[in-house]
C-alpha cells in the first residue's frame, strides 16, 4: 500500500504550499482516479507520491509518504523506483532516445539497475506481454503512434518491478484511438494486481476503470469515494471537473424528462 | 607547395574510398561540400584579397590578389574538406548507439554515454520540430524564403520556440529517466555491444601508430610547416 499522510508540499522558489495536509491511500490491486481542475494539485500529488518531489525537483515536504507501512524518507530515487513509478503525459519526453528498438527501450530501466541480463530480458518480455504489445518489440520507439508510445512508456515503468504505478494524465496528448488503447491496457494492467493512481482530466477514461475516485481542489482532497458515486457528484463541475459523458447524457435525458440510460440499454 | 596539398588530398582519397565501400559516398560528398562551403568562401575571399605575396595576379581596387594568397586559400580548402569528409564519414557510417555503448563498455561513465547518445539522437528530433514550427510560422505570414535578409529575419521566430519547447521538455525527460533508475550509482548492465573483429582492432592500432608517427615527424621538423 502507498500512503500519503498529512502531505504538505511547497515547490522550491514558491512562498506557499501547493498541497495541504493530503491523506491518500492506494491499496494493492486498487485503481484510483485522481481528478481536479487545472493547477488543482493532481500532478503534484503524483510527484510527491513517487518521491520525485522533493528528491529530484527540490521543494519542501511536510508529512510523509509510506510504502507498505515503511516511510520512504531516506530512500534514493532509484531505490524508490523499484516500488513506485510515475508516468507522464507526453510519450516523446518519456523516451530515452538511446534505444534502437522498443524492447531495448523497455529493458533500459532494469539495465540501469544493473540486474543480470537474464532478469532484464525476462522483465522486458513480461512488461510487453502485460500490455499486449509484444508485436512492437522490434519497432523503432521514435516511430510509434502516440498511443503506442504511451504504452511503451508504461511498459518501461512496469519493467522496473514496481507494484505501484502513478500515471499523470496518460491520455492528455492522445487522440481518441490512442486513449482507447491506453484505457484497455490499464484495465489489463489492473487485472495483474498492480495498484494504479491515474490523474486525469478526462473522466471518461476513469469511468468504469477505477474502483475509487479522489477529487482534488486547491491542493486539498475534497472528495474521496467509490468511482460511480464520485463521478456523479453534482459538485464536480464546481471543482473544475467535467463529469463523464455517461453522467452528462443521463442528466440531459432527465432534464428533458426522457427515459433514463438504463431503459436505453446503457451498460451499468 | 605541393606538400601542403599532398597529405590532405591523400586523406580525402582514403576517406572517399571508405565511404564508397560503406555505400555513403554520394551523401558524404554532398554533406562535406555543405559543411565546407560557408567557411571556404570566407577563407578564399580573405586569403586571396589580403594575404601578401610577391606574385600579383590581379589588382582589385585597393586589394592585390597574389599567387601566394590563392595557394594558401587552396591549401586551407583541401584541409577543411579533409576534416569535413572525415567527420562526415564518421557520422554517416557509425551507429551512434553502437559507438556510445562500446565506449561505455570500455569504461565511459553511463551519464556521459547517455548525454553523448542523446545529443546525437536529438539532432533529427530538433530538426523535425524546427520544420513543424517553421511551417506554423509561415502559415501565419512569416517570410522565410527569398533574400538573405528575409531569411535572417525569419530565423528568430523559429529558433525561439524550438529552444523554449526543448527546454520545457528537459525537466520531464530527466524525471522520466530518474524513475527508470538512471541516477543509480555504479555501472549498468549492457544488453549488447558491437562486435569487434580482429581486422578492426588491427586498423585501430595502425591508426594510433600512424598518429604517433606523424607527431614525431612533426616534432623532428621533417614535415613542411603550415604556411
Image: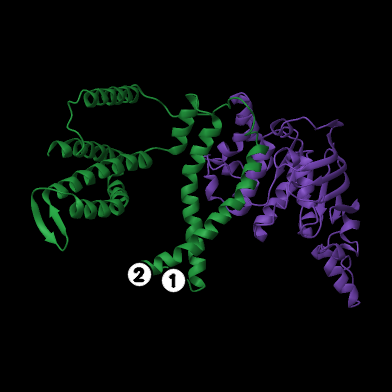
Chain colours: A purple, B green
Label 2 environment density (alpha carbons within 10 Å; few <14, some 14–19, many ≥20): few
Residue A237, horizontal then vertical, whole percent: 85, 65
Residue contact at pointers 1 and 2, CB within 8 angstroms: no
Query: B90 or A27, which is in the foreground?
Result: B90
Q: Residue at x 68, y 34 (%)?
A: A160
Q: Position of residue A203 (x, y in %)?
A: 79, 59
Q: Quadrant where the C terminus of chain A lies? A: bottom right
- CA distance for labels 1 and 2: 10 Å
Compared across the picture, whether A174 is left or right of B27 comes to right
Kindly identify which numbered label has been placed on residue A196.
none
Residue B147 shows which numbered tag? Answer: 2
In-image side of A71 versus B81 (left or right): right
Residue occupied by mark 1: B143
**Element assignment for label 2:** loop
Dot 1 surroundings within 10 Å: few (below 14), some, or many (20 or more)? some
Question: Please, which chain is the residue tagged with disc 1 on?
Answer: B
Amino acid at each position: 500500500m502507498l500512503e500519503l499522510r498529512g502531505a504538505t508540499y511547497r515547490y522550491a522558489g514558491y512562498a506557499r504550499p501547493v498541497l495541504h495536509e493530503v491523506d491518500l491511500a492506494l491499496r494493492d490491486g486498487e485503481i484510483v482516479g485522481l481528478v481536479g481542475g487545472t493547477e488543482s494539485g493532481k500532478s503534484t500529488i503524483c510527484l510527491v507520491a513517487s518521491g520525485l518531489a522533493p528528491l529530484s525537483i527540490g521543494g519542501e515536504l511536510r508529512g510523509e509518504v509510506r510504502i507498505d507501512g515503511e516511510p520512504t524518507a531516506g530512500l534514493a530515487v532509484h531505490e524508490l523506483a523499484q516500488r513506485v513509478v510515475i508516468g507522464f503525459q507526453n510519450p516523446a519526453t518519456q523516451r530515452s532516445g538511446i534505444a534502437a528498438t522498443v524492447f531495448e527501450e523497455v529493458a533500459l530501466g532494469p539495465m540501469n539497475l544493473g540486474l543480470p541480463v537474464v532478469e532484464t530480458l525476462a522483465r522486458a518480455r513480461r512488461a510487453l506481454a502485460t500490455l499486449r504489445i509484444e508485436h512492437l518489440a522490434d519497432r523503432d520507439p521514435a516511430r510509434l503512434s502516440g498511443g503506442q508510445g504511451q504504452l511503451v512508456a508504461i511498459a518501461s515503468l512496469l519493467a522496473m518491478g514496481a507494484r505501484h504505478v502513478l500515471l499523470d494524465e496518460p491520455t492528455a496528448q492522445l487522440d481518441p484511438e490512442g486513449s482507447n488503447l491506453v484505457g484497455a491496457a490499464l484495465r489489463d494492467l489492473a487485472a495483474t494486481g498492480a495498484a494504479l493512481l491515474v490523474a486525469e482530466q478526462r473522466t471518461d477514461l476513469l469511468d468504469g476503470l477505477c474502483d475509487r475516485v479522489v477529487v482534488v481542489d486547491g491542493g486539498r482532497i475534497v472528495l474521496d469515494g467509490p468511482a460511480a458515486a464520485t463521478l456523479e457528484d453534482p459538485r464536480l463541475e464546481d471543482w473544475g471537473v467535467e463529469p463523464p459523458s455517461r453522467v452528462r447524457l443521463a442528466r440531459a435525458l432527465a432534464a428533458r424528462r426522457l427515459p433514463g440510460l438504463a431503459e436505453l440499454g446503457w451498460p451499468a | 607547395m605541393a606538400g601542403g596539398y599532398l597529405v590532405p588530398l591523400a586523406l580525402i582519397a582514403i576517406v572517399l574510398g571508405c565511404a564508397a565501400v560503406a555505400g555513403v559516398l554520394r551523401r558524404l560528398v554532398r554533406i562535406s561540400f555543405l559543411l565546407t562551403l560557408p567557411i571556404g568562401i570566407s577563407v578564399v575571399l580573405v586569403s586571396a584579397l589580403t594575404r601578401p605575396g610577391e606574385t600579383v595576379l590581379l589588382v582589385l581596387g585597393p586589394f592585390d590578389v597574389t599567387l601566394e594568397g590563392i595557394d594558401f586559400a587552396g591549401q586551407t580548402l583541401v584541409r577543411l574538406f579533409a576534416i569535413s569528409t572525415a567527420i562526415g564519414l564518421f557520422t554517416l557510417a557509425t551507429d551512434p548507439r553502437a559507438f556510445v555503448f562500446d565506449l561505455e563498455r570500455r569504461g565511459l561513465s553511463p551519464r556521459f554515454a547517455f548525454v553523448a547518445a542523446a545529443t546525437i539522437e536529438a539532432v533529427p528530433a530538433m530538426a523535425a520540430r524546427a520544420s513543424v514550427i517553421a511551417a506554423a510560422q509561415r502559415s501565419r505570414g512569416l517570410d522565410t524564403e527569398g533574400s538573405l535578409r528575409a531569411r535572417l529575419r525569419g530565423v528568430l521566430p523559429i529558433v525561439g520556440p524550438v529552444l523554449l519547447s526543448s527546454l520545457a521538455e528537459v525537466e520531464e525527460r530527466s524525471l522520466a529517466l530518474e524513475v527508470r533508475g538512471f541516477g543509480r550509482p555504479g555501472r549498468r548492465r549492457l544488453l549488447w555491444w558491437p562486435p569487434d573483429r580482429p581486422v578492426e582492432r588491427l586498423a585501430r592500432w595502425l591508426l594510433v601508430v600512424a598518429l604517433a608517427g606523424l607527431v614525431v615527424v612533426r616534432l623532428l621538423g621533417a614535415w613542411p610547416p603550415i604556411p
